[in-house]
Image (cartoon, coloured by chain):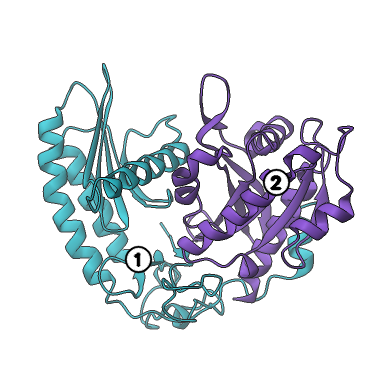
Chain colours: A purple, B cyan
Amino acid sequence: MTFINYASREINCKIVYYGPGLCGKTTNLQHIFDSTAPQSRGKLISLATETDRTLFFDFMPLELGTVRGFKTRFHLYTVPGQVFYDASRKLILKGVDGVVFVADSQEERMDANVESLYNLEENLQAQGYDLMKLPYVLQLNKRDLPNIIPVEELTAELRRKEEPIVEAVASTGAGVFDTLKAVAKQVLTELRKG
Amino acid sequence: MLECFAAFGEDDPRRSGENKTTEKRFTFSGLTPEAFGFSNQSPPFVLASLIFKQKVVLMADTPLLLREQQYHQIKAILARLRMDSAAKVVFLIDKDGQEIASQGEIGNLDTTSLASLAAGNVAATGGMAQLIGEKEFPTLSHEGERESIHISVIGRLLLIVVFDERSSLGLVKLRSKQVSQQLSVMVDEISKTEFQDEDPFGEITEEDIDSLFQ
């Protein structure tokens, strides 16, 4: 749910990174956190297990800059990717303004991608949203690994509409900011549409 | 202080399905007094001080518009609660984790993270409540060695009280309950405020958006 605060002249938007377990959602956030100046971002809160698997969500507020005198602030969230945390995933989608689906490009994770994408559509529906109408980006992550599926094949299988597709290697930061930019732009364009 | 919040709520056209009620969303043609629905007798700084505009599903499923006076009333209620309960900080946030108003010794407290985690906390316990056949748990308390937190659910809003050994859970619970009723009545009144369809960002250009990513 976009909040516009005229006192501090701020726009607050919520972006959720979704995808199967170990696809790199937290790594995306970690890279953004590591690469931005401390004055542009808040703390990276990770509610994770002792083995660093996301238990509930990661959260990080990020200030992108000023548009028409308004500071644009994005609240970035990730969901827990593991199948059995579905109840938590559903809760985190509440009030979402834009979604990034992080797909794992490895062959053996294709089924997990498809299942997770289906789960996203289902959980959005449960919250009253329609993926077809939401700002949305498909990120194809782990493009540096040897056993990956070609982009065309992943696109054919996972693309739902005319969403931007970004190839990424979140562990090195490649494509991470392009993804963020693509989704943030759509969210702001939605605001403009009024 | 000039403040205005606005939010897309249940009527956001991006939403669909059963929860969707109407295609209406706010539009806003500029910071003119008339656009905010203020009369031209008001001083200019007040004219631009529409302070809060949010869709809240407390009573009727209609948008909520909070004006400066109401915002200050809420701040006053929070200040009173803070004093009566001998609390350190009192917050009012919405269930999505956005801060609406606060009172107290904020200092270096990371209020953004606190609001987000409190909302996550309430969402998680609300989920548990539904699993055991409850609608929700109306209050949550977390007691630490020195600092403690008490959260009350008031419809779509959350009242958060942070307190230490100068107070007690019993006192905070009692005072929060009294204030919850007050806030609930107030939000009910606020929800009756007429909603004006206005668009604050109709004039944003592609270039404006691109400039963020230079």
Is residue B126 rendered to the left or right of residue A98? left
- Residue at the (41%, 42%) spot, across then down: B120
Q: Which residue in the protein does label 1 denote?
A: B56
Disc number for residue B183: none
Q: Who is closer to the viewer here, B67 or A85?
A: A85
Crowding at mark 2 (Cα within 10 Å: few <14, some 14-19, many 20+): few
Q: Where is residue B10 in the image (x, y as percent from the top left)?
A: 43, 69
Question: Residue B104 occupies which quadrant of the picture?
Answer: top left
Query: Which element is circle 1 on?
Result: loop
Q: Who is closer to the viewer here, B205 or A43?
A: A43
Q: What residue type is labelled 2?
A: Asp
Question: Residue B191 occupies which quadrant of the picture?
Answer: bottom left
Q: Position of residue B64 (x, y in %)?
A: 35, 70
Residue A68 visible in rendering:
no
Q: Which residue in the protein does label 2 denote?
A: A111
Q: Where is residue A133 in the image (x, y as percent from the top left)?
A: 62, 70
- Residue at the (71%, 35%) spot, across then down: A36
Where B117 sits versus B46, above or below? above
Where A139 sits versus A173, above or below? below
Q: Do the residues labelled 2 and 1 touch (CB within 8 Å)?
A: no
Residue B110 visible in rendering:
yes
User: Where is the N terminus of chain B found, in terms of image quarters?
Assistant: bottom left
Q: Which chain does tag 2 point to?
A: A
Where A11 sits versus B15, above or below? above
Crowding at mark 1 (Cα within 10 Å: few <14, some 14-19, many 20+): many
Q: Who is closer to the viewer here, A115 or A36?
A: A115
